[in-house]
Image (spheres, rainbow, N blue to C red):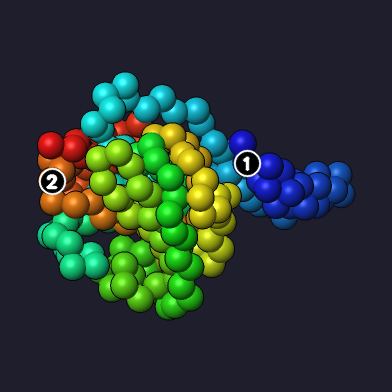
Amino acid sequence: MIKDGYKFAAAPILLGVIALGFHWVWAGGVLVFLGVFVLFFFRDPERTPPSDPQSIVSPGDGRVMEVVEEALGGNAGRRISIFLSIFDVHVNRSPVAGRITAIEYRSGKFYAAMRGRASAENEQNAFHVSSERGEVVFKQIAGWVARRIVCWKSVGDSVTRGERVGMIRFGSRVDIWMPDRVEILVRPGQHVAGGSSVLARWR
């Protein structure tokens, strides 16, 4: 459980208990349910990354929306976009082991995270991770519900594959860009788990 979950859940649960004490059953029930849902949203299950050092794992839980050819900085590559619903775990993880060489925050729009333009235009936080086999870039992207991107890492930090790096509160999206020398192992519509599902392998 992310500790912020207790902070956000405390008020509705306390107010709900008070309301139930006054026999305001409907109001109390709604408030307690809201508090319990907040705790559910902030859950943080343990994940075990695969032992294969060539694997690249998903940076988040959700449904793969698209796999597209996309250049970055003049380098050919592929982008995988993953949609996180409010029912998915929203803790984000590093897809590879390496060192964070840059973290780029950019303000922007709050289009629905399922829309293609969200990748380019929404508020986002991009991690550049240099690994032994090449650079991988992944983004935390806010949606129309999510208005808070949380980052727990700094430039220069070393990360392991599957290590927690931050979270996005409520519905959102994560994108990952990889150079074209990787083999993609997922397809649109597939559900993946952050830190454990393998998206691709280095060739």
Q: Which part of the image, by quadrant, shows the C terminus? A: top left
Instruction: Establish if 125 lies above or below 53.
Output: below
Residue at point 37% right, 27% down? 49
- Of tags 2 and 1, the one toward the viewer is 2
Q: Quick one: 136 or 200, which is closer to the camera? A: 136
- Identify residue for label 1: 2
Q: Is residue 166 visible?
A: no
Q: Are marks 2 and 1 in contact (CB under 8 Å)?
A: no
Q: Percent from the top left, x then y, of residue 201?
A: 19, 36
Amino acid at the residue labelled 2: Arg
Q: How many numbered markers are drawn?
A: 2
**What is the CA distance from the residue labelled 2 to the residue labelled 1?**
36 Å
Q: Is residue 103 visible?
A: yes
Say which of 171 and 16 sits in front.
Answer: 171
Q: Which residue is mark 2?
A: 181
- In percent of the image, x 40 and y 72: which residue is there? 122
Circle number at residue 92 = none
